[in-house]
C-alpha cells in the first residue's frame, strides 16, 4: 500500500531502456526488423542507457549531450493492481546537440525514420517538422508519434507518412473533443485528404482505434483485457504496424497487427513490452 512519509520496500526491480523511440526500436528488433536507435545520451544515466541497449543487442548511435539522460520510474502496487508512473522533467538540450541529432537522422541510410516521444527542453517545437521535407525529398518515410506543439507544427508542415496520435493527442491537435469512432474517423480522413499525412492511426486504448489512409477509413472496437501495465502499449502498436507495412501488408491489416501488439503489451508486466509470439496469438483472436 502506498502511504505518505512511510518507507516503502519494493521487489522485482528491473531496468529497461525506454522512451518512445527506443521502445519502438526494441519491439522492431524483437520482430527481426533491421533497426538503428539514434538518441541523445548524457551523464551517468546516459551511460547506463547505452549499456542496456548493448545488452539488448540493439544497434545504436548515441548523440552526446551535456545534461543527464532522464530516468523514469514505473511502480506496480500489488495490493490494488494500480500502476504509478513517475516521469522527471528531463535534460536541457543545447542547439548544437539537437542539430547533431537532426544530422544523424539525415545521414542514416534507413528508408523509414520513426520519430517518437516528447521533445526535451531546449529543442524547438518544429524539430519534427524540420525532418519531414528533407526526408520526403530523399524519398524516405517519416513516421511520427508525438504530442502538443510538436505535433501541431509537424502537421502544419505536412510530409508525414504515418502519424500515430492517441485520441487525447488528436483532440489537442484539433482543439476539440471527439466523442465517437465516427468523429475520429471523419477528422482523420479530412487531414489525410488535405495531404497532411499519408496515414493517421489514432489509438483509443481499450476502445481500439481508427485508421485513415488514402484508401478510406477503418475502425476497430478494441480488446477488453486485464491490463498488467500500460507502459509502452502505444509504442508497441506503432512498431508492429510499421512491421506489417514492411511485410507488404495493406494498411488495414498492418493496423490490426498494431492493435494486437498494443494489446499484447498491456498483458506484459512492467516495462518489458510485447513479445512476437504474443502478438501473433492476439492477432489470430482479434474480432
Image (cartoon, rainbow, N blue to C red):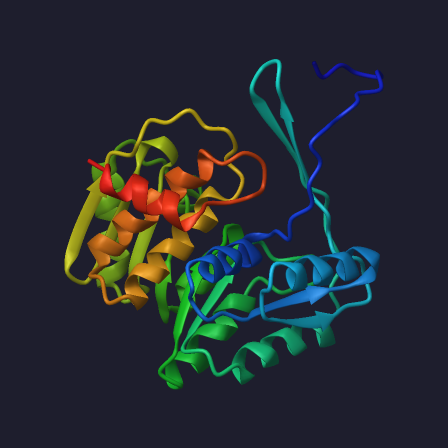
The residue depicted at 31 percent of the width and 55 percent of the height is 200
Number of numbered discs on residues: 0
Q: State left or right for residue 279 relative to residue 78.
A: left
- Percent from the top left, x then y, of residue 156? 41, 64
The quadrant where residue 13 appears = top right
- Percent from the top left, x then y, of residue 79? 62, 13
| Image vertical order of residue 271 relative to residue 10, above or below | below
> 86 or 254, which lies in front?
254
Q: State left or right for residue 13 relative to residue 262.
A: right
- Percent from the top left, x then y, of residue 154? 45, 64
The quadrant where residue 244 appears = bottom left
| Image vertical order of residue 76 relative to residue 232, above or below | above
- Percent from the top left, x then y, of residue 237? 39, 49
Q: State left or right for residue 264 relative to residue 213.
A: right
The residue depicted at 54 percent of the width and 59 percent of the height is 21
The quarter of the rendered structure image containing the C terminus is top left
> 270 or 135, which lies in front?
270
The residue depicted at 45 percent of the width and 78 percent of the height is 110
Q: State left or right for residue 117 relative to residue 145.
A: right
Q: Residue furthest front?
A: 277
The residue depicted at 36 percent of the width and 31 percent of the height is 206
The quarter of the rendered structure image containing the N terminus is top right
Residue 173 visible in the displayed image: no
Residue 253 visible in the displayed image: yes
The quadrant where residue 272 appears = top right
Amino acid at each position: 500500500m502506498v502511504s505518505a512519509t512511510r518507507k516503502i520496500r519494493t521487489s522485482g526491480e528491473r531496468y529497461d531502456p525506454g522512451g518512445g523511440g527506443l521502445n519502438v526500436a526494441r519491439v522492431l528488433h524483437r520482430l527481426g526488423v533491421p533497426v538503428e536507435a539514434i538518441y541523445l545520451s548524457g551523464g551517468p544515466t546516459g551511460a547506463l542507457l547505452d549499456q542496456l541497449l548493448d545488452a539488448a543487442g540493439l544497434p545504436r548511435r548515441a548523440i552526446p549531450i551535456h545534461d543527464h539522460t532522464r530516468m523514469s520510474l514505473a511502480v506496480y502496487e500489488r495490493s490494488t493492481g494500480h500502476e504509478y508512473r513517475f516521469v522527471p522533467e528531463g535534460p536541457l538540450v543545447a542547439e548544437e546537440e539537437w542539430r547533431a541529432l537532426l544530422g544523424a537522422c539525415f545521414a542514416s541510410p534507413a528508408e523509414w525514420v520513426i520519430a517518437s516521444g516528447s521533445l526535451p527542453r531546449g529543442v524547438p517545437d518544429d524539430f519534427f517538422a524540420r525532418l519531414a521535407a528533407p526526408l520526403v525529398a530523399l524519398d524516405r518515410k517519416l513516421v511520427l508519434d508525438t504530442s502538443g506543439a510538436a505535433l501541431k507544427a509537424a502537421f502544419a508542415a505536412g510530409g508525414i507518412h504515418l502519424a500515430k496520435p492517441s485520441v487525447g493527442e488528436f483532440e489537442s491537435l484539433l482543439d476539440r473533443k471527439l466523442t465517437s469512432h465516427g468523429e475520429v474517423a471523419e477528422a482523420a480522413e479530412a487531414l489525410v485528404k488535405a495531404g497532411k499525412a499519408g496515414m493517421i492511426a489514432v489509438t483509443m486504448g481499450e476502445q481500439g482505434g481508427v485508421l485513415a489512409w488514402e484508401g478510406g477509413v477503418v475502425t476497430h472496437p478494441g480488446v477488453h483485457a486485464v491490463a498488467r501495465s500500460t507502459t509502452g502499449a502505444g509504442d508497441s502498436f506503432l512498431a508492429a504496424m510499421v512491421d506489417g507495412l514492411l511485410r507488404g501488408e495493406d494498411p488495414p491489416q498492418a493496423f490490426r497487427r498494431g492493435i494486437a501488439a498494443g494489446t499484447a503489451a498491456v498483458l506484459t508486466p512492467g516495462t518489458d513490452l510485447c513479445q512476437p509470439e504474443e502478438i501473433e496469438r492476439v492477432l489470430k483472436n482479434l474480432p
